[in-house]
Image: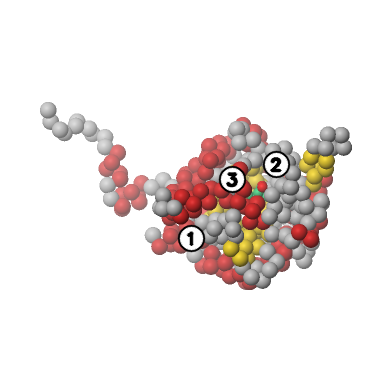
Amino acid sequence: MSEKLDLPIRPRRNRKTPAIRGLVRETVLTPADLIYPLFLHEDAEDTDIASMPGCQRYGLEGLVREVGEASAVGVKAVVLFPKIEDSLKSPKGEECYNPDGLVPRAIRAIKSAHPEVAVITDVALDPYNSDGHDGIVVADEKSGDLRILNDETVAVLCRQALCHAEAGADIVAPSDMMDGRVGAIREALDEAGHEGVSILSYTAKYASAYYGPFRGALDSAPKAGDKKTYQMDPANWREALREAELDVAEGADMLMVKPAGPYLDIIRAIREEVDLPIAAYQVSGEYLMIKAAAADGWIDEEKVMMESLIGIKRAGADMILTYFAKRAARLLRAE
Ligand code: PBG
């Protein structure tokens, strides 16, 4: 018997050299696709974050330097997450719209040093709220059960978004999952003359255990209860499409899916239904699973990092929020 197969179709021909693989590559990741989440605090010093090895919490000077380094390797968008001092936290989170608060000062510092970088801000109450929830919490008089107030929270979120817009934010990103907040924020921004400020809506944000390390970084874990009455059930995908439809109708400019890696089907489902750009957030737990496995020598950190990002882009994301942004951009430039 001849060992030669009678095989006119051989897919391996398209994989035979790097040049040919380059020609047929369907998905390309570039530094311009990446958004760099950065943690900041009131101290002047930068500090390591115990729950997130490889990430730091920056003082304003360190923050501006880090944004500059990211911009130099092609990462032109950052999203800011503040650690707020306990003394400034309150049940209604009023500090979130203080025009001299940490976030507005950081926006102004970044925009004056690196005007080419798009500044995105997180709109939600959890860093400011003494209950550690994204919205205002009340305890039910009879049962004692906690309720997160929707409409009252939306009113505060509008003030927070306005405060960020006034400080110069390019994009506000509501991450709280309250109903109706995209429309309300759009209206508040437009009324104040900020029709140029974009809304990146956390459209399908799941109640995920992958956020654990992030809450450690900001000391923002809920004091009681969980986030399941506002964040989505990981079991659901039709509901994500419903959220997407609402965000489109309310005037969102971009939609987000979060987490990213375990929710690639949701990215794809929204991609197929909606024409708006889609962002995906590779969250703290996804980042740390790669870091931890690599620290023990079980996987190759850089290769798995790049593969995780290309997988998210292939699923249909136009942009990716990732703690690996600066490192990934460096590698992409060296290729
Ligand atoms: C809070 C917020 C969270 C994250 C981003 N914004 C945590 C949460 O919803 O509890 C998580 C990001 C990450 O895990 O990297 N509004």
Give yes or no for contact between labels 1 and 3 (Cβ–Cβ under 8 Å).
no
Q: Residues within 10 Å of mark 2 (few under 14, many from 20)?
A: many
Front-most of residues 134 and 32: 134
Quadrant in which the N terminus is drawn: top left
Residue that mark 2 sits on: 227
Give yes or no for contact between labels 2 and 1 (Cβ–Cβ under 8 Å).
no
SS at mark 1? helix
SS at mark 3? helix
How far apart are the alpha carbons under marks 3 and 2? 13 Å
Sequence-wise, the earlier of marks 1 and 3 is 3
Q: Residue at x 78, y 56 (%)?
A: 89
Residue that mark 3 sits on: 210
Give x and y (percent) for residue 260: 55, 44
How far apart are the alpha carbons under marks 1 and 3? 21 Å
Residue that mark 1 sits on: 327
Q: Which mark is residue 188?
A: none
Quadrant in which the C terminus is drawn: bottom left
